[in-house]
Amino acid sequence: MPRVVDHDQRRAQIARAFQRLLAAEGFGGVSFSRVAGEAGVSVGLIQHYFAGKDALLRFAYEDAVARMSERVRVRVRNSEAAGSPVAEVLLDTLVELLPLDAERDLEYRVRQGLQAQAQHDPGLAAVARRSGAGLLEYVVSVIESGKEGGEVEPAVDASLAARLILAATQGLADQVALSGAGAFPAREVLDRAIGTVFTTRRRQSPRQH
């Protein structure tokens, strides 16, 4: 009997080969022939799944964002199950955006490369906006939970505070990428940034989201 092909798995295989090349060499090192070699498939097979490089770019971006989001969801579930304070749940979540190991470093490089391309590609820009909006919405909800639990002052503007924390997270991620994961205590720095909003932390379980 002929082998059944898992088309979603094949698309992911191609997209992740593209991501590895992008992370290692930048866009100058990426072509269908290079991706084919990295993925162990033919150029024709890539063209069967992706009409052009733009389609591969968008799929690769969506795949990178989806993988990161799933890892963040796992972190949130584990932290909430452990009964951590809201601020610590947020810290555990945002640490996943820092390039502190090989997996997160690759994801960081892919996101940065594709976000740069998004300046000139409306499709990529739409993916970036959706990802950013989802992350902002999550952080806002955590800050609102912090208000309810007494970890955040009631007068704090949750949207502005969330943007402040996310800006600090992105800047910290850039520093880690340039300096190396062991150059400074990145988690502690991020904890301080979160502490500018969660100024009255209390030891209690966060509200379930």
Image (cartoon, rainbow, N blue to C red):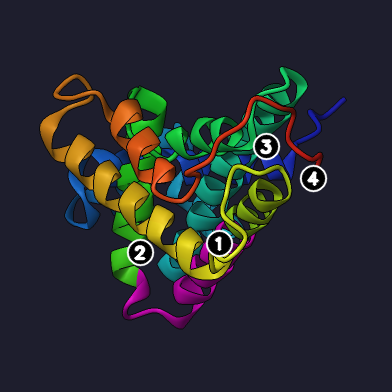
**Marks 1 and 4, the one that precedes in the sequence:** 1
Q: Which residue is mark 2?
A: 115
Residue underneath mark 1: 136
Is residue 36 visible to the viewer in this orientation of the structure?
no
Discs 1/3, front: 1
Q: Is residue 107 left or right of residue 138?
A: left
Residue type marked 4: His
Q: Amino acid at mark 3?
A: Arg
Percent from the top left, x then y, of residue 156?
A: 54, 64
Q: Disc number at residue 209?
A: 4
Residue hosting label 3: 73
What's the distance in space between the residues labelled 1 and 3, CA to CA? 14 Å
Q: Secondary structure at mark 1?
A: helix
Give the answer, above or below, for where 50 lies relative to 187.
below
Query: Which mark is first along the chain, 4 or 2?
Result: 2
**In the figure, 94 relative to 47: above or below?**
above
Q: Quadrant of the N terminus?
A: top right
